[in-house]
């Protein structure tokens, strides 16, 4: 009887270890995906910053052009 209990315990421990390994691998995979997404986020945030700078520069240039046109006597 004690041998059967020991075998049952061993089986439960084996299942626990296997499940623990599976969960650890899933955690590692999720961590990798998170790092990849963070890298992509940083890249996209940099692009947004660049586009905002370009937009600001274009706005300033258009305002200068419009002010020059306003100064012309077209009438």
Image (spheres, helix red, strand yellow):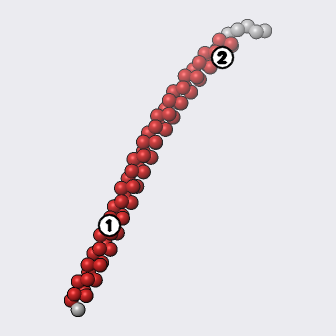
Closer to us: 23 or 64: 23
Q: Is residue 10 left or right of residue 22?
A: left
Q: Is residue 24 left or right of residue 36?
A: left
- Tell me, yes or no, whether the two marked residues, 1 and 2, touch with CB atoms within 8 Å: no
Residue depicted at x 59% and y 18% = 61
Please identify the quadrant where the C terminus is shown.
Answer: top right
Specify the label residue 20 is tagged with. 1
Specify the label residue 66 is tagged with. 2
SS at badge 1: helix
Please identify the quadrant where the N terminus is shown.
Answer: bottom left
Which residue is outermost to the bottom?
A: 1
Graded by Cα atoms within 10 Å as few (under 14), some (14 to 19) or many (20 or more), the crowding at tag 1 reads few
Residue depicted at x 70% and y 8% = 72
Graded by Cα atoms within 10 Å as few (under 14), some (14 to 19) or many (20 or more), the crowding at tag 2 reads few
Question: Of callouts 1 and 2, which one flags the residue occurring earlier in the amino acid sequence?
Answer: 1
Residue 9, relative to residue 54: is it above or below? below
Q: Position of residue 29 (x, y in %)?
A: 39, 55
Alpha carbon of mark 1 to alpha carbon of mark 2: how far? 67 Å
Residue 47, relative to residue 22: is it above or below? above
Residue 46, relative to residue 25: is it above or below? above
Residue 4, relative to residue 47: is it above or below? below
Which residue is outermost to the left?
A: 2
Q: Quadrant of residue 38?
A: top left
Residue depicted at x 26% and y 78% = 10
**Number of dots carrying numbers:** 2
Q: Position of residue 14 (x, y in %)?
A: 29, 74
SS at badge 2: helix
| Foreground disc of the pair 1, 2 | 1
Which residue is outermost to the right?
A: 75
Closer to us: 65 or 46: 46
Q: Is residue 54 left or right of residue 73?
A: left
């Amino acid at each position: 009887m004690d041998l059967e209990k020991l075998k049952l315990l061993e089986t439960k421990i084996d299942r626990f270890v296997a499940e623990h390994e599976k969960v650890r691998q899933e955690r590692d995979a999720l961590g990798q995906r998170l790092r990849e997404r963070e890298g992509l986020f940083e890249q996209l945030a940099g692009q947004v910053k660049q586009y905002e700078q370009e937009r600001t520069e274009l706005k300033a240039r258009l305002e200068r052009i419009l002010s020059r046109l306003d100064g012309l006597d077209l009438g």
